[in-house]
Image (tube, grey):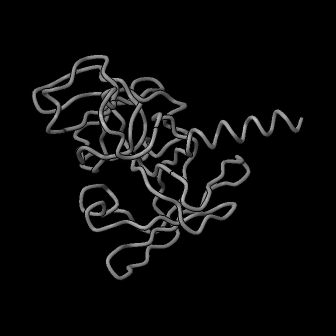
Amino acid sequence: MFTGIIEEIGKVIDLKKENENLHITVEANFSSELKIDQSVAHNGVCLTVVDLQEKSFTVTAIKETLEKTNLGELKVNDAINLERGMILGERLDGHLVQGHVDQTATCINIEAQNGSHLFTFEYDAALKNVTIEKGSITVNGVSLTVVNSKMDRFSVAIIPYTLEHTTFKNLKVNDKVNLEFDVIGKYVKRLTEVRNN
């Protein structure tokens, strides 16, 4: 379980294909504090640490993960949002995030505003995921509040601190991002569907 508060921007230093899997090696300051089998969110995707080096660690993404997230598009030297699993009993500064990406979206607009940036994302509404005004959404692992909620798009306002301390500073129009919709909203939607069938 995660909170969507990014701890660090890591750097992809190696990518190795093995059959349908991709081994991703990431340089990160907290690498020395990790252990094998620990979960780390990478752009919002929960992956297990399988190897450790002094200043880096390696995780493995399977075919399904590569197809349903933006991790398959990673290149060496890319920046990646990182968060270790939350510690039970600590403050929950973001919202409950599972690290299970529901689908991807495309950035369709970036607008500089007075003191913030408004990012707008479009996603495939056929998958029936929904956002609500002032509800929570996770974009590339970052816990954010939805504004301008539509059936196939939404916006988020990014303050300067978040822009500087996440990969939002590198995001461009047409870039693909990972989305995890609010877990409570997903259960409510599913229960409603079951009741209506």
Residue toward you, 62 or 157: 157
Give the answer, above or below, for where 136 lies relative to 37. Answer: below
Give the answer, above or below, for where 73 lies relative to 144. Answer: above
Image side of residue 53 versus residue 64, left or right: left
Residue toward you, 45 or 1: 1
The residue lying furthest to the right in this view is 197
Q: Where is residue 54 drawn, in percent x and y? A: 10, 27
Image side of residue 26 versus residue 94, left or right: left
Q: Where is residue 70 drawn, in percent x and y? A: 46, 46
The residue lying furthest to the left in this view is 54
Classify residue 195 by image quadrant: top right
Give the answer, above or below, for where 12 lies relative to 106. Answer: above
Q: Where is residue 66 drawn, in percent x and y? A: 49, 37
The residue lying furthest to the bottom in this view is 114
Residue toward you, 37 or 113: 113
Q: Where is residue 64 drawn, in percent x and y? A: 55, 31
| Residue drawn at x 30%, y 20% as measured from the top left | 50
| Residue drawn at x 35%, y 82% as measured from the top left | 114
Picture quarter with the C terminus: top right
